[in-house]
Image (tube, rainbow, N blue to C red):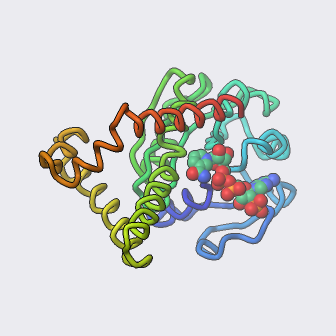
Amino acid sequence: MGSALVRGWLKNGLNNISILTPDTPPKNITGKCQTWFTSPEEIHQDFDVIVLAVKPQILKNVCESLTSIVKDTTLILSVAAGKSLPVLAEYFPKMIPIIRTMPNLPASIGAGVSVCISNSQCQKHHIDIAEMLISSVGTVEWITDEHLMDAVTAVSGSGPAYLFHLLESMTKAGIVCGLPKELSKKLARQTIIGSAQILDARDELTATQLRENVTSKGGTTEAALNVLMKNDVFSTLVEEAIKSAKKRSEEL
Ligand SMILES: NC(=O)c1ccc[n+]([C@@H]2O[C@H](COP(=O)([O-])OP(=O)(O)OC[C@H]3O[C@@H](n4cnc5c(N)ncnc54)[C@H](OP(=O)(O)O)[C@@H]3O)[C@@H](O)[C@H]2O)c1
């Protein structure tokens, strides 16, 4: 997610970025950033914003290792799933401005959707800089009830993977129905891409209206939907999956 955000920022001309990562930097962003660090000890400068994009499991250690470079005015922007503002605040020795955000993978191509929440140390300029950073990689929503963040994580944070799995399932079904593998993959892929573009182009129509518009009485689409919608089987499965992601976010 860190490299997805950096790719989005670089694409938008924001290149005053330093990256701290213990490993070899990803090839597609090497050389374009101002500075690379492999350990916090190498850092002897101040930053307006520090973005935390490590796994939640190691976040506490990473925050503790950053203590000497976090000033009172440094904005901490965390993308870590499940780590609440009070928990994040405990990882630093003093009260500092923190914004928690949940972006998603399409941020890497400027088509993400992110939800943000700020702590009481944040002033207007902190909110503005976070809005600028996050809106440069997609759309931004702000919430004030942090409990909603687990559901946000489950719907949009993890959401791209559900669509990739739908693509896998449609491709597999096409092959079972006799299509050559490559053709099935192309058809399923372009169907998802094209349908997403229709959602965008015809935003005055709801998903229900779009579905009804392509479902002729007694036709092939209706035959498939009769299976998917029988006893709400598909939406129940999606609900179960999203509840499970929400529960995991709560546990983290
Ligand atoms: N993936 C998503 O779609 C998504 C969506 C929303 C939010 N998030 C959140 O984004 C965060 C990162 O998730 P991810 O899926 O991007 O994980 P990831 O692919 O494992 O990326 C984590 C990065 O942190 C680096 N790292 C490890 N230890 C570090 C340290 N001590 N200091 C600095 N960098 C360190 C890792 O380097 P190495 O490869 O060398 O270990 C890796 O480049 C998580 O908190 C997750 O909840 C992810």
Query: Which picture quadrant has residue 63?
Result: top right
Relative to residue 180, is residue 89 drawn left or right?
Answer: right
Relative to residue 123, is residue 196 drawn left or right?
Answer: left
Residue 186 x %, y %: 37, 73
Residue 28 x %, y %: 59, 74
Q: Which one is nearer the viewer's eye here, 184 or 164?
A: 184
Query: Which picture quadrant has residue 178?
Result: bottom left
Q: Which one is nearer the viewer's eye here, 112 or 194?
A: 194
Quadrant where the image shows the C terminus: top right
Count of labels shown? 0
Quadrant where the image shows the N terminus: bottom right
Residue 178 in sight here: yes
- Considering only vertical position in the picture, is 193 above or below 250? below
Residue at image x 33%, y 38%? 229
Residue at image x 36%, y 65%? 188
Residue at image x 22%, y 47%? 222
Residue 50 in sight here: no
Residue 189 x %, y %: 38, 66
- Considering only vertical position in the picture, is 186 above or below 46? below
Considering every residue shown, the one lying at the far right of the view is: 41
Q: Which one is nearer the viewer's eye here, 27 or 163?
A: 163
Residue at image x 59%, y 34%? 244
Residue 133 x %, y %: 49, 49
Relative to residue 236, is residue 35 drawn left or right?
Answer: right
